[in-house]
Amino acid sequence: MDTITFYLLGVLIVIYLVILAKNKRGKRERRSRKFMDGKKRHSDKSDR
């Protein structure tokens, strides 16, 4: 019974770490997308 508890805790920790890694990657992509959008808008203004 004790080993089952440890296995369940281990699985929950792994799932938590996977979700945490996905969230960090999503934030980084959103931030870089905003940065690129700003560059595109700036280049459009300089073309006019």
Image: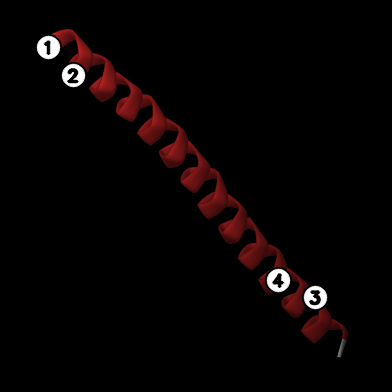
Depth check: give the residue in front, 31 or 23.
31
Q: Position of residue 42 (x, y in %)?
A: 27, 15
Work out whether 41 lies above or below 22. above
- Alpha carbons under labels 1 and 2: distance apart: 5 Å
Which comes before the other along the chain, label 2 or label 4?
Answer: 4
Circle 3 sits on which residue?
Answer: 6
Colour scheme of the picture: secondary structure
Amino acid under label 2? Asp
- Alpha carbons under labels 1 and 3: distance apart: 62 Å
Amino acid under label 3? Phe
Q: Secondary structure at mark 3?
A: helix
Q: Which mark is residue 12?
A: 4
Residue drawn at (77%, 72%) of the image:
9
Work out whether 48 lies above or below 10. above
Depth check: give the residue in front, 11 or 23.
23
Circle 2 sits on which residue?
Answer: 44
Residue drawn at (51%, 53%) of the image:
22
Q: Quadrant of residue 46?
A: top left
Circle 1 sits on which residue?
Answer: 47
Q: Position of residue 37 (x, y in %)?
A: 32, 29
Left or right of 14: which side holds 34?
A: left
Depth check: give the residue in front, 3 or 21.
21
Q: Quadrant of residue 11?
A: bottom right
- Alpha carbons under labels 1 and 4: distance apart: 53 Å
